[in-house]
Image (spheres, coloured by chain):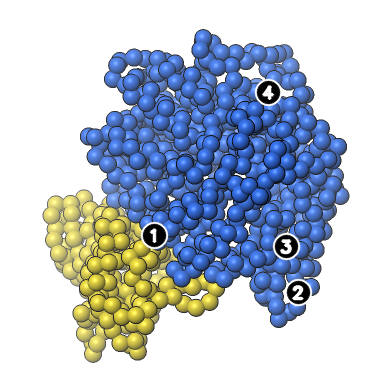
Chain colours: A blue, B yellow
Amino acid sequence: MAVNLNDELLYKVSKPVRYIGNEVNSIHKDVGKIDIRFAFCFPDVYEVGMSHLGMRILYSMLNEKDDIWCERVFAPWPDMEEVMRQNHIKLFALESRDEIKDFDFVGFTLQYEMSYTNMINMLDLAGIPILTRERQRSDPFVICGGPCAYNPEPLWEISDIFVMGEGEDVIFEILEKYKSWKGKGLSRMEFLKSIVGIKGVYIPSFYDVEYKDDGTIKRFYPLYEGCPETISKRIIRHMDDSYFPEKMIVPYMNIVHDRIMLEVFRGCTRGCRFCQAGFVYRPVREKSRKKLLDDAEKLIKSTGYDELSLTSLSICDYSDIKGLVTDLIEAHEKDKVGISLPSLRIDSFSVDLINEIQKVRKTGLTFAPEAGTQRMRDVINKGVTEDDLINSVTASFESGWSNIKLYFMIGLPTETLEDIAGIADLAYKVADAYYTVPREKRKRGLKVTVSLSSFVPKPFTPFQWEPQDTIDMLKEKQLFLNGKIKKRHISYNTHEPHVSFLEAVFARGDRRLSKVLIDAWKSGCKFDGWDEYFNYDSWIKAFEKNKIDPAFYANRKREYDEILPWDHINIGVSKAYLINEHKKAMEGKITKDCRMGCTGCGMTSFEGKGVCFDGALYSKVKEG
Amino acid sequence: MARYIAKLKKGEGVKFISHLDLMRCMQRAIRRSKVPISYSKGFNPHADMSFATPVSVGTASEGEYMDFMLEFEMDENSIAEAVNRSLPDDIRILWVKRIDEKLPSLMSMVDAASYEITIINPQPKLIIQKSIDSFLNRPSIEVMKESKKGEKLVDIKPMIYDIRLKSNDGPISVIETTIKAGSRSNLNPELLFNAMQLYMGLKDSRIRDITKKETYTEESGKFKNLWL
């Protein structure tokens, strides 16, 4: 049923364009011919959600099928939520304006922990019971994926189904089973049982957990026969054969990443020890230059965008990057299409490459040294040196850039004040490098921005056992650094440590936290990633009410033999490898990039030989 | 290089997009259509096009004008057809005309605009031509204007040319008004409605729709369409 969202209501809210849909390339279908209606939900506002590539891929892919209609749903901004609740308008899908409670599936992508309350709020706004066990036959199935789904436990009683890994293939296998379940009058449980054997599918309600007196996990076990003991993630083996849209929706409003996003490869070989993406998205699989040029051509034609961003982790590691960038520019320079690269790795950054890009359009440059001293960078296995950074920024200043952003983290394992002072030193050296470039060669208006985040230990990284610094320690370190940065051209911004603390709690949380999430939501928490809505006191009250100490999750050092809440999920990287990496970190020893030779993370025994570097140019990779 | 103007319609379905949204949408549609729009030189090339006036979020329009340059001359109807094929259905190019490069910018020619405002009003007796006339005959019409810098009291009387009651059907009243527009002096129709609410006792009424009907230029004391 379509909601009655008339214009009088839209006049009352900010940015009503978020709710009108009908953008170029959005997909509309005749409901009468549809078997499965899928609501793809992003638990944040339109302009954030529309910037997410995964949603763009799955949206187009599902809609290729005649009998499936996938529509988009975003979290309404609080002013819109108020209007909706006052006027009894339930959460609706953007394309049809139909209430999503009548859909077959409601899928959420979990990109960051601080969006969990928005997910609960969206279910409530939709009129769907927030707890799995309270849902009836007529309610949709709630299915979750995305990076945060790798530790699904804090949402175990809210989501019916989790999908581990890349969703392209597994989603169709689930929908096939759904078709044979639908209309037979069977229970919800019957459907879940029919998919529990599909690789990558995790049904949390089919498992139970027991705890020890000290609060750690004693035992995690399946309740029914046929439930796998461990749930393995899914990957696409050959990226050239994978689905990539030829058309993408072109929003009316200015979204966060308002450009074509071209996915070049998946995975990362660097092995930075803090980075969850670097482990969970293994192995590296590349698309060919030909496929990418083809996709780019189609997307430029169908969208009219004048900017194309090559999106992948550590983009310069693509084995054919120079060829790709050169060809893209040659093909589209005349149409004034600019090519942009996300945050660059310092060492792989070549002057030629930026000069190629600069021919058309200049954007600011971002580098991520992550830590201020070589010792600290070795601990986190960020295998770059100060010389790498200074050479790269000098080259960029010579090529006419003057706006440099530097990403750093504080609170890293083994960190000392010396490491933090090193951040300021490095920023100063970057500024000094600008003045080594002759005045007539450099562009005026030097600006160096130091962006400082707080380290959040994540599951499936070598630092998953590490305690996070307390809020007070993080604040002290921020103040310390602030006192060190006193130069006109260097600006400095930090993240709110309270938010990082809660991220650390939920990133490595267990099932007991679901009650906290629900209580926090009940007391009004939502949009926790937005400063203006983040309410730390409400969160603390929710922990107190449930007699849970958040420090147990964030600030406690775990032992190697402790059963971790996500131990039943298998990402293909072995625990033994992570333990070894953790030990090497404590010894300050680096691990080489696996393009230089296999480091034995376990991926080849998980997926079979030949899976690493599928599609890459052979000359750029040493065989393991 | 060849200069053109186009008259556009911003339909009901997209009335909630902003002026910037509309410009971006038009630029991308032109790019998709392959019509050879010309670009500025430099590191950040911009498509050479501009709108005569901005149109607000929430306002539909049947009388927008756009000024643009092409790399080479093209048939007027072919331009309109090609761009219309690339535009969302709710945005239409009504016609395209080749004009002299030396003419002043459209933007600088705008003096006024007319709007049709549909009002939902539970007390229909309050909106009659007589009450509108006495509103217009007030010595001044002062109203609070919100801006980024804060609130300011402004007298909008000199910015109103006329207000006519078009129809009154139960709780739905439709008025037409011509007010100042353009870079020299501009009145937002929503602000005009706020003033009417204030001075005509229309506290409980609200806007259902606003449509801009036409954009005008003044020539020897008379308003005529910006371009015919």
Compared with residue A387, is residue A145 higher up or lower down, i.e. above or below? Answer: above
Residue depicted at x 51% and y 61%? A328
Whether label 4 touches label 2, CB < 8 Å: no
Residue depicted at x 49% and y 68%? A333
Question: In the rendered structure, the residue with mark 3 lies on which chain?
Answer: A
**Residue tagged 1:** A301
**Residue tagged 2:** A437
Which one is earlier in the sequence, the residue at label 2 or at label 3?
3
CA distance separating discs 4 and 2: 52 Å
Q: Are marks 1 and 4 on the same chain?
A: yes
Residue depicted at x 57% and y 36%? A147
Compared with residue A386, is residue A283 higher up or lower down, i.e. above or below? Answer: above
Residue situated in front as seen by the camera: A547 or A401: A401
Residue situated in front as seen by the camera: A81 or A34: A34
Callout 3 crowding tier (Cα within 10 Å): few <14, some 14–19, many ≥20: many
Q: Nearer the viewer, mark 4 or mark 2?
A: 2
Can residue A174 be seen in this snapshot?
Answer: yes
Residue depicted at x 76% and y 24%? A560
Q: Nearer the viewer, mark 1 or mark 4?
A: 1
> Residue A354 at what x, y percent from top left?
63, 65
**Residue tagged 4:** A564
